Image: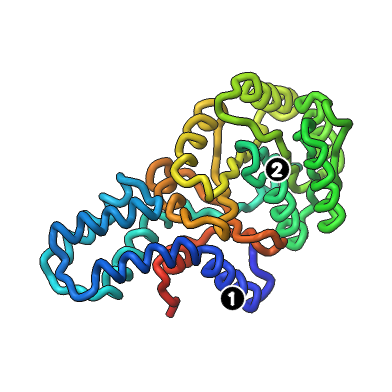
Amino acid sequence: MSYPDKDAKAGWVSRLKSGLSRTSQNLNYNLDGLLNKRRLDEKLLEELEDILIAADLGLSTATKLTTKLARTHLNGAISTGEVKEALADAIAEILGPVAKPFVPNPTLKPHVVLFCGVNGSGKTTTIGKLAHALTRDGKTVVLAAGDTFRAAAAEQLQIWGERTGSQVFAKDPGTDPASLVFDALTLAQKQSADVLLIDTAGRLQNRGELMAELQKTIRVMQKIDETAPHTCLQVLDATVGQNAHSQVEIFSNLINVDGLVLTKLDGSAKGGVLVALADKFSLPVYAIGVGEQSEDLQSFDAREFANSLLGIEAN
């Protein structure tokens, strides 16, 4: 995903800051109260760690960040601004390796992307936004309505198909999802589409039969292309906070999750969970979402995110 021009890039950065404002305001309010005119000693570091945990960065990541800060600033005078800059640098260092924009492989016709996640995570909307970005970049896209249990999902995809000029492959509600995906992939291959984006039904981690169905869908498409899906993206709702960890663990144990997309950052005070996920799983973060509009899903930039989280203005 790319920005059409500088104004579009600036607009996204502004929306990102606004989307992360609840997380940033809570974090910075607590940091400002803690750090005002204090030396960075062991007690302050413990309190700082508690603040980072409360911002959903998790115990392990919070400890890593405060330990790094202690190496260079322990028992020294340090301003609030300097602490925030140091934390932003450390967070960007964690996030940098996972920031990976989605780029379709041009040798695949199509590049098959399977979306998975729990109910309500925002998969269908994410697919529509990604289709918007891809078609804007000149790619031909087919959308597969693999969530055959929720009629509204196919209707949503139809709307996105009209908006983006993408073909939508759908069947009657209740159709076997694996069969639908098989036919959608066959169609996309015949048309030499650049990308096939496959929606799937939301499934709770504790529903074994639904998880088995997802595995079946993958096996069936591999009868046509043994390398498919070429990318498996798990969509996560940022408002669930630390529960995102168990979601990633369970889906990764069942299928080969290649990367993550975090949605609804604009409705959450738990945006710090993205840092914890990156630190724990090292899975690529392909995109983040901060709103409902087409342009509100963009490639993930580590420095932009870290600065927005700490309320730091870019130079």
Please, is residue 144 above or below residue 13 in the view?
above
When the figure is inspected, residue 126 is found, relative to residue 28, above or below; the finding is: above
Q: Marks 1 and 2, Cα distance to the nearest angstrom?
A: 30 Å
Q: Is residue 173 left or right of residue 313?
A: right
Front residue of 185/86: it is 86
Q: Name the secondary structure under disc 1.
A: helix
Name the mark nearer the viewer: 1 or 2.
1
What residue is shown with label 1? 10
121 and 54: which is toward the camera: 54
Counting from the top left corner in percent of width and height, residue 264 is at 59, 54
**Residue sitting at the far left:** 75
Tag shown at residue 111: 2
Image quarter of the C terminus: bottom left
Q: Position of residue 144 (x, y in %)?
A: 79, 39
> 281 left or right of 189?
left
Q: Which residue appears at 37% of the width and 67% of the height?
A: 28
Answer left or right for 288 relative to 27.
right
Question: Which picture quadrant has residue 295?
Answer: bottom right
Colour treatment of the image: rainbow
Residue 184, numbered label: none
